[in-house]
Image (spheres, rainbow, N blue to C red):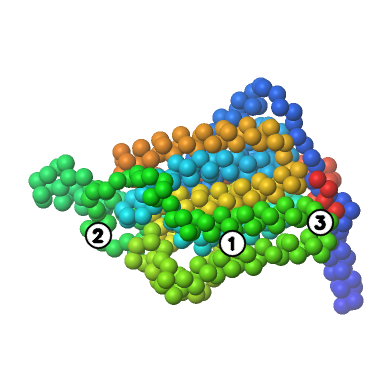
Amino acid sequence: MPEAAAAMAQDYLQVVVNFLWHPNESSYQHVWPPIEFGWRIIVGSLIGFFGAAFGSVGGVGGGGIFVPMLTLIIGFDPKSSTAISKFMIMGAAGSTVYYNLKLRHPTIDMPIIDYDLALLFQPMLMLGISIGVAFNVLFADWMVTVLLIILFIGTSTKAFMKGVETWKKETIMKKEAAKQANATGNEETDYKPLPAGPGGGTATKLLIKEARKEEVSVIENVCWKELGLLVVVWATFLVLQVSKEYTLTCSKWYWLLNLLQIPVSGGVTLYVAIGLYKGKRVIASKGAEGAEWKAIKLFMYCLVGILAGVVGGLLGLGGGFILGPLFLELGIPPQVSSATATFAMTFSSSMSVVEYYLLKRFPVPYALYFAAVATMAALIGQHLVRKLINILGRASLIIFILAFTIFVSAVSLGGVGISNMIQKIHNSEYMGFDNLCMYDP
C-alpha cells in the first residue's frame, strides 16, 4: 500500500513537471499588428493618455493600464505589450521628472525629489529590473497573472487606507488653521499644511506659513553628487547589458556579465545604507525622523527595492507600484513620494527599455508614438493635479489617485490574463516555463 501511494505521488509530480517544463517548447507567440490609423489607435491613445496622466501623478507609471490597452485594443501579444508599456512609462516618467526638477518640498527647504531616498532604492531597483526581464522570458502568462492580482489588490488597499488616514489629518489641520485665523482676527492668513504620514506630530506643528518659493532654478535644485552616482549606476548597467549582446546566451561570459550587476548595485546601496545607519546621511523629507535608521530596516528596504524592480521588469510596470506605497508608509509626503518614485523609475524604465530592445520585443515606431502620448499626458496631468491640490489643500488626492490606478490595473491586467489563460487551456496550448537559453528574439 505505501508503495502504491508513493508511485501515485510520483506520477502526479511527473504530470506537474511535464506541464511546467518542456525545454524545447515555448508559450510565447510573437504578434505585432501593423500601424494603421483607425479606431484602435484613437481609443488606445485616449486610454494611454489618461493612464499616463493618472500614473504620473500617483508615481506608478501607468503600466497596469498600458498593458491591457496594448493587448486588448491594439492587438499585441502580452509580452510585447509589456515591452512597449515600459517605453511609455519611460516617456511619462522622464517628462514628470522634468516638471519636478524645479519644484521644492511642500514644507521643508529642499527639492521635492529626495535624492538620498532615490539613491537608496534605485540601484536595487535596477538590479531587480534585470532579474524581472529575464523572468518575463521564463514565466508563462498565467503565472504573471496570479502574481499580479495578489500583489495589486494588496497594495491598492493599503494605499487607499493611507489616503483616508491622510485625508483625516488634513481635515484636522484645516480646522486648526481656521481657529488660528479667527483667533488673530485675520481671515486672510495663508497657511500651508504639511501633507505627511503618521508620526508627524501635533496639528499645530503641521501648520506652517507659506513664506518661500515653490519653484527655483534647476541648477539650484539638483543634488549633483547624488545624481552623478545614480547616472554612474545606470551607465554601468547599460554597458553590461550591451556587452551581453556580444556573448552567447547562457555562456560563462553571459552569466559573468549578469553577476557583475550585483557588486555595482550592492556597492552603491551599501554606501548609502552605511551613511544612513551612522547618521552621516539623512532622508531629509522625513524631517527629524529621517536621521534614525536600523540595520534590519535598511536591509528590508533594499529587498523591497529589488522586489519592485522584479515586478516592474516582469509585468512591464513602473517600480512605483511598490515604491509609492512604501514611501507613504515611511511617512514621506505624497508629493515627495510621487516625485521620488517617478525619478527612480526613470532610470529603471529606461534600462528595461534597452533590455527589451536588445531582445527585439517591440516595434520601434509603435513604441515611439505611444511614448510621445504618455509624455504629453504626464505633463498635463502633473500641472492640473498640482493646481487642484493648491486650490483644495488636499495632498491626499495623490494617494487616492495612486490607489485608484493600482486597483484599475489589477482588474484590467487580471482580466486580460485570466482571459488568455482560459483560451490557452481551451486550445490545449503549452503553459509552462520557457527556456531562457533557447530564446531566439
**Residue type, numbered disc 1:** Met
Asked if labels 3 and 1 touch by Cβ distance under 8 angstroms, the answer is: no
Kindly indicate whether the residue at mark 2 contacts the one at mark 1 (C-beta within 8 angstroms).
Answer: no
Distance from disc 1 to disc 2, alpha carbons, whole Å, reads 35 Å
Compared with residue 74, is residue 438 higher up or lower down, i.e. above or below? below
Q: In which quarter of the image is the C terminus?
A: top right
Count of labels in the image: 3
Q: Which mark is residue 395?
A: none
Residue at mark 3: 247
Mark nearer the N terminus (1 vs 2) = 1
The secondary structure type at the circle numbered 2 is loop
Foreground pick, 312 / 124: 124
Q: Position of residue 135 (x, y in %)?
A: 72, 56
- The residue positioned 81% from the left and 56% from the top of the image is 247
Q: Measure the alpha-carbon separation of dots 3 and 2.
A: 59 Å
Task: Determine whether the residue tagged by mark 3 lies in a helix, strand or loop.
Answer: loop
Residue corresponding to mark 2: 205
Q: Is residue 307 at least partly visible in the picture? A: no
Above/below status of 200 relative to 210: below
Check the image and name the residue furthest to the left: 185
Q: Mark 1 = which residue?
A: 124
